[in-house]
Image: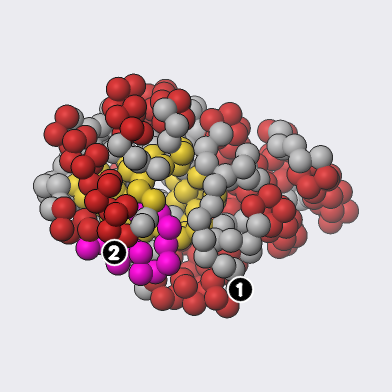
Amino acid sequence: MPATNVTATDARGLLRACEVALIDERRLLEADELRALATLNDEQVPALTALAHAVRLEWCGPTVEVEGILSVKTGGCPEDCHFCSQSAQFSETLPATPFLDADEVLSAARETARTGASEFCMVLAIRGPDERTLQRLISLVPLIEAETGLNVAVSAGILTDDQARRLADGGVHRYNHNLETARSFFPRIVTTHTWEERYETCLLVRRHGMELCCGALLGMGESLDHRVELLGQLQALDPTEVPLNFLNPRPGTPLQIRRPLRPLDALRWIALFRLALPGVILRYAGGREITLREFQAMGMTSGINALIVGNYLTTLGRDPDEDLRMLEDLQMPIGALTGVI
């Protein structure tokens, strides 16, 4: 995604104006401001990330929220999300497995708690929950909370109004449902459901009092304008948390041909997500290991203030001790967060 030739003087002026807007005036940046920031030259990215880190500290403080996730129902998903190796519609993808036993879920939650995490998310590869699945999720929430003290999050696809209400009443703290990409680009990535269906589920989550976790997946072939469009849509949706994923091209999926983002581009967009969404919990999620490699600590000083530790749904993460050591080296305390946007 090439940048334009922005002079150093113009870049300083733009960054200063955005600093005033976000720190002095405490207002959200508009699309034209975000687009201008996105076109800064590579050599201006360090100044961009420095501003994002200052905004993160001003709006959210130094605390980092740690979360563990568990795929409690893996593979066999009927949807055709082109990035996902759990879709039943592509070759060489993961076979369907049944819902994990309660003991397996509790064991994973206990392991998450030992890292100092405050969040544990149960994730299911489904379009949306049927009645049996919904009941199993609701029955697990109080067990996990009582056993570990963790806040419990759920990611179970598209919800009805009644399902959202019952999950909220059952004690679900946060519900994850990613928009993934901009509305205008979404039909090129998914055809079995619409962007609008995802957006409506996000509204239901908020309507019933759960915290909304709604993120993005970068590197699917979307343009700069698509990413700026998505930032505006996330601003309007007002989530508590935004997990930021980077495409890890999976064999057998339509997006296996894509290459991971350059580390510098990943840092640029981490900063832009922070500057667009100054008060959210901005979480390192899937793909950071192959995209940023040895530069992961730089993401923590570019706007990130939360991370998933351990493995992801179908790919391996790095050892949790490495992430905890990184936070210790950066002198970033671990704790629970709530967005303020």
Counting from the top left corner in percent of width and height, residue 146 is at 29, 54
Is residue 338 visible in this depiction of the protein?
yes
Image quadrant where residue 132 sits: top left
Kindly report which numbered mark, 2 or 1, lies closer to the viewer in this rendering.
Answer: 2
Q: Residue 320 in the image: x percent, y percent?
A: 39, 71
Residue under pointer 2:
110
Kind of residue sitting beneath label 2:
Arg
Which one is nearer the viewer's eye here, 301 or 238? 238
Give the spatial CA distance, label 2 vs label 1. 25 Å
Please name the residue shown 72% across and 46% down the image: 37
Q: Is residue 185 left or right of residue 111?
A: right
Question: In this rendering, is residue 15 above or below 88?
Answer: below
69 left or right, relative to 300: left
Q: Is residue 295 above or below residue 258?
A: below
Viewer-proximal residue, 31 or 226? 31
Tell me the magenta residue range: 107-120
Task: Using the rendered view, name the quadrant where residue 191 is placed.
Answer: top left
Residue where numbered disc 1 is placed: 331
Q: Residue at x 78, y 47 (%)?
A: 23
